[in-house]
Image (cartoon, rainbow, N blue to C red):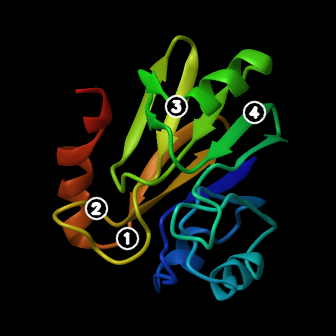
Amino acid sequence: MRIGIIADTHGVIHPRIADVFAGVEYIVHAGDIGGAHVLKALRAIAPVTSVDGNNDGDSMGDEIKRLTLGDTNILLTHILPRPRELDARVRDALRKQPADLVVFGHSHLPHNEVVAGVRYFNPASAGPRRFDYPTSVGLLVDGELTHVALDERSVGALEKRMNQLSR
């Protein structure tokens, strides 16, 4: 199964999204969407499940959704904040029902790490550039997770900023 993973679009559909997500069977968006037009554009590519982020109306980023895609049980949230220091909501949700993969956003920092048997993945931001952070998305293809830089500058930024939330 081929799944597109995106977060922190903040109202922007990067021009490379359609190409990078071509052929995906499903898309998950980890919040700070920035408007219905973003979800409409993504739904033109594949079905989408999303959570609201702290910049999406009055949600305060407290939404958690679960879904199973292929053989992968996914917990989708916006604010984690760190894989080794989970927000109580996320920790409690994982205790009630474990997940194979936790997809999150908010920090705009790329992350791909296994902690206590659970993979934590943040695709980084696909929206407006922030600081020297990468602009990127993720792909889950046949169980393998990768980040995809959306511009040349982000290639080095992905390497530089990867897994900073656990340092």
Residue that sits furthest to the front in the current view: 58
Picture quadrant of residue 48:
bottom right
Would you call the spot at circle 3 few (<14 residues within 10 Å), some (14-19), or many (20 or more)?
few
Would you call the spot at circle 4 few (<14 residues within 10 Å), some (14-19), or many (20 or more)?
some
Q: Is residue 163 left or right of residue 99?
A: left
Q: Is residue 38 left or right of residue 165?
A: right
Per the model, the C-alpha gap separating discs 1 and 3 is: 29 Å
Q: What's the residue at 49%, 73% (across, down)?
A: 9
Disc with the residue nearer the chain's start (2 vs 4): 4
Q: Which residue is mark 3?
A: 87
Q: Which residue is mark 4?
A: 72
Q: What's the residue at 76%, 77% (across, down)?
A: 43
Query: What kind of element bears circle 2?
Result: loop
Per the model, the C-alpha gap separating discs 1 and 2 is: 8 Å
Name the residue type under label 2: Pro
* Residue 150 numbered tag: 1
Instruction: Please determine whether, in this image, residue 41 is positioned above or below residue 92.
Output: below
* Residue 134 numbered tag: 2
Per the model, the C-alpha gap separating discs 2 and 3 is: 24 Å
* Residue 40 numbered tag: none
Name the residue type under label 3: Asp
